[in-house]
Image (cartoon, helix red, strand yellow):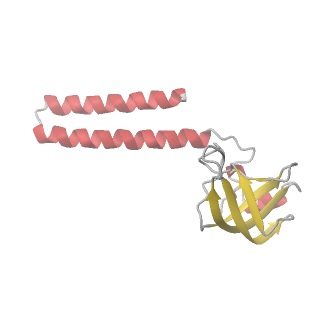
Amino acid sequence: MNAAYYVLAEAFQTLFEDSMDLASRAGYGTMASWTSRMAERTAVMGAALAVQTLAVHACSCPNPNPTLDDLIESGPEIAVFSGRVVSIVSPDPKGPTVTRIAVDDVIKGDVPRTVEMTGVTAREDRCGVDFRVGEVRTIAATKRADGRWFTSICLVPRL
């Protein structure tokens, strides 16, 4: 785990212990119980936020938050299209998922009617995309030398 995560977790634990100690010394019997629940919830929410923040910052994009125009104007290796996420499946339980997108509109490049990408979800890659079945997304992708398509959060335009 990242060192920053441990620092944040320790800070939340200290916050929790201090609020419990204060409530106890003040003689708030039922208030101590309420304070305990609130401190626990605050610690959990803060830790979750810290982990999400660390995960987002773990990915380095050459051009973070590109616009659609940025992606259209990028090099010829970048294809830009929109389509509906048809499926996200894992043929092998220990292997990467395959995300299948039915392409509705090709904005740039030569794109097949269905694009399959392996290992590009947020669950699998720190720069992965948070795809959801049924949603329509506009993304950019590259076709690798082996013929497989690839995308990342660095290639998702801000709208």
Residue found 63% across the figure and 52% down from its top: 90
Residue found 38% across the figure and 41% down from its top: 44
Residue found 45% across the figure and 31% down from its top: 8
Instruction: Count how many numbered circles sit on residues in the image.
Output: 0
> Is 11 above or below relative to 45?
above
In the picture provided, is 109 more to the left or to the right than 118? Answer: right
> Is 25 above or below relative to 46?
above
Whole-percent x and y of residue 92?
A: 64, 48
Residue extending farthest bottom: 104
Whole-percent x and y of residue 6?
A: 47, 28
- Quarter of the rendering containing residue 130: bottom right
Whole-percent x and y of residue 147?
A: 85, 53
Whole-percent x and y of residue 73?
A: 84, 59
Residue extending farthest front: 92
- Quarter of the rendering containing residue 102: bottom right
Q: Nearer the viewer, residue 11 or 78?
A: 78
In the picture provided, is 18 more to the left or to the right than 100? Answer: left
Q: Quadrant of the C terminus?
A: bottom right
In the picture provided, is 22 more to the left or to the right than 89? Answer: left
> Is 65 above or below relative to 50?
below
- Quarter of the rendering containing residue 140: bottom right
> Is 53 above or below relative to 107?
above
